[in-house]
Image (cartoon, rainbow, N blue to C red):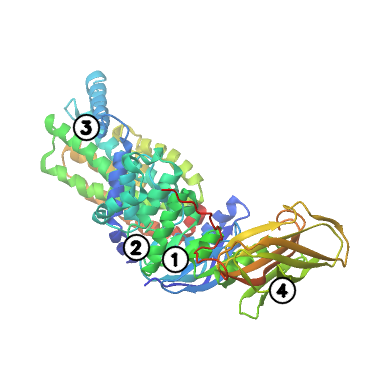
Amino acid sequence: MGRIQVSNLGKAYKQYPNRWSRVAEWVSPFPVKRHRLKWVLEDINFTVEAGQAVGIIGINGAGKSTLLKLITGTTQPSTGSVTITGRVAAMLELGMGFHPDFTGRQNAVMAGQLLGLSVEDVLALMPQIEAFADIGDYIDQPVRVYSSGMQMRLAFSVATARRPDVLIVDEALSVGDAYFQHKSFDRIREFRRQGTTLLIVSHDKAAIQSICDSAILLNAGKLAKQGSPEEIMDFYNAMIAEKENQVIRQEIRDDGKIQTISGTGEATVTDIALYNARNERVETVDVGSDNILQVKVRTKAAIPRLVLGYMIKDRLGQTIFGTNTHLKEQPLEMVENGEEIIYRFAFRMNLGPGSYSVATALVSNDTHLENNYEWRDLALLFNVANLSKSHFVGCAWLDPELDIQR
Amino acid sequence: MNMLKGVWLYRGFILGSVQREFQSKYRNSILGAAWTVINPLAMIIVYTVIFSQIMRSRLPGVDNNLAYSIYLCAGTLTWGLFSEITGRGQTVFLENANIIKKLSFPRICLPIIMVLNAGLNFSIIFSLFTAFLLITGNFPGWVFFAIFPVLLLQAVFATGLGMILGVLNVFFRDVGQFFSIFLQFWFWFTPIVYPVGILPENIRRLLVFNPMAAVVNAYQDVLVSQHMPHWQSLLPITVIGALLCLFGMRLFRKHVGEMVDEL
């Protein structure tokens, strides 16, 4: 129960040169073809095993929503097939076709019926639905007076009132407020523990990385890459910056992690290392110690404005801290070809114990979207260990001065 | 077969939708469902007062001052059912584009809901009309029940036609525009308001090509002349109705997938 198999899936829309060509095609006694096929999805193959959680990532128009619609059966594929076992609950768009003049309660019943539940089932689940949607008296008000967040909460509560074997969620969840997002993600996690297969489309990196086992990157209607959420997210970020003559390279590091390097290549990081207060190169540093991150950069062309940025990420790939020389107001102007630049960032390691990575970016401005000379994920790995402080938990070192009065 | 199974699984949704659609019409009114009765009642009263009392219209060969009102009602009420099924049929997919695009469910439910709804509206109006016949002493007796098989034939014919128009209208919006005009001509080419006798002979011959003429005539036979309809005159509409339904289903099945892309 809950296995999704997508094989050779493709979707094309028919495009007719003018209004009459469709008529010609329909009434002609012998088969004629007057339309052009516009492929929005092509040759998609993947399998999601029961209980897995897979994130789907891609820029707008990459075909994510179309893929979900094909998987839920809302639209029919032009080629290939989708096989799903078990009961599917899908949250494709906001509101699920609520009727504005009926009350939330009546709409919940109707939405439940559309999901294949009987009226008795829905009525039995109603107290739960009401409690989870948490919209109070509004449940007996017509839906037209609801805010979009309230509609979403009700829709989500109905769709997930009973644990489905497969839960398919489009970006809908980003509508609710922070409290409801937490609540709905908790519910999704709970379903995951109980064995629900999850397919989720999101631009929220943190959501994908914290909940998914693997991720799929769609690009221009094709399956560009499939792998661990971190690897795919890195590749996706690199891809956003992709332009002409940029290359994206993924290399497997010695420790088995996959490093993504992209960019136009006018500048490159030749060396990166962490130094302690005694200026010794180190891989493991103490919590709260003073350190220097040294980055050597070599240019391969003249660059009018060069900015170096770095991000420290934890083992899940979540960004802990990041800054750049633009933000520090020290960008380099008129850098010549073949120059070697040494950057030294001195800071106190106020991080909790654990393994961290550093990603670097050589750009011309605040973001990597304009000129991306080089983007390097997992440029450096280091460990933080608690060698001298009393025991504490968490990912940050926020040691308090304690004062107790009684 | 799969389609039937889908319909059965979604029977709750179908019945619920019929109920909701009925309710939604009078949702924000104070009198609510009373309007479903008041509207047709007003129509019957208007017809009766204007035609039998003020204009004193008489049907040739019938000695009853209510005969013309009954004649009129027999035609317009049943034509109302026909035009509701075909008219709503042609927009059924367009109107529900919202849920068709968002949710996965057997699409065949939509025309079923539409036909059931039209049937519900009609049965309210027609019960009222029957009560009117009983009160005024014009109830035709046992012959009355011959109406039901005719209604069934008409519903099948209208549903087939409505399905075809509904599917076509998704792809060619001109169909909807054209049919609403065509329906008006059709109405006046059917002896509903006027008795068939006033038509010139050469035009009256053309009525053979109007399947609705035979149906309306059957109602008038039962309700006005109070005798059995000419069953053999209903043969064409039976055949055409069956063919339209078959063709409509074929068209629907062939294009239901493409329809989602077009809406």
Q: Chain of mark 1?
A: A
| Three-letter amino acid code at the position of disc 2 | Arg
Label 3 to label 2: alpha-carbon separation = 58 Å
Image coordinates for residue A79, horizontal then vertical, percent: 52, 69
Q: Depth check: B221 or B255 in front?
A: B255
Q: Please give the residue where the numbered disc 4 appears in the rendered image.
A: A281
Q: Label 3, secondary structure: give it.
A: helix
Q: Residue at x 67, y 71 (%)?
A: A380
Report helix, strand or loop for mark 2: loop
Q: Earlier in the sequence, mark 1 or mark 4?
A: 1
Judging from the image, mark 4 belongs to the subunit labelled A
Is disc 1 surrounded by few (<14), some (14 to 19) or many (20+) residues within 10 Å? many
At label 3, the amino acid type is: Ile
Q: Give the camera-side residue of A273 and B70.
A: A273
Between label 1 and label 4, give the one nearer the viewer. 4
Q: Are marks 4 and 2 on the same chain?
A: yes
What residue is pinned by disc 1?
A: A198
How far is disc 1 from disc 3 in space, using C-alphas?
Answer: 63 Å
For the point 36% across and 52% down, the residue is B110
Could you tell me how far apart the alpha carbons at marks 1 and 2 are, in whole angstroms? 11 Å
Q: Which mark is residue B65?
A: none
Q: Is residue A246 left or right of residue B47?
A: right
Relative vertical location of residue A190 with respect to residue B172 in this rendering, above or below: below
* Tags 1 and 4 both on a single chain: yes
Q: x, y percentage for residue A164?
A: 36, 64
Alpha-carbon distance for marks 4 and 2?
52 Å
Which sits earlier in the primary sequence, circle 1 or circle 2?
2
Label 2 chain ID: A
Q: Is residue A347 visible?
A: yes
Q: Which residue is mark 3?
A: B70
State the CA–CA distance, disc 3 to disc 4.
104 Å
Q: Residue A163's mark? A: 2
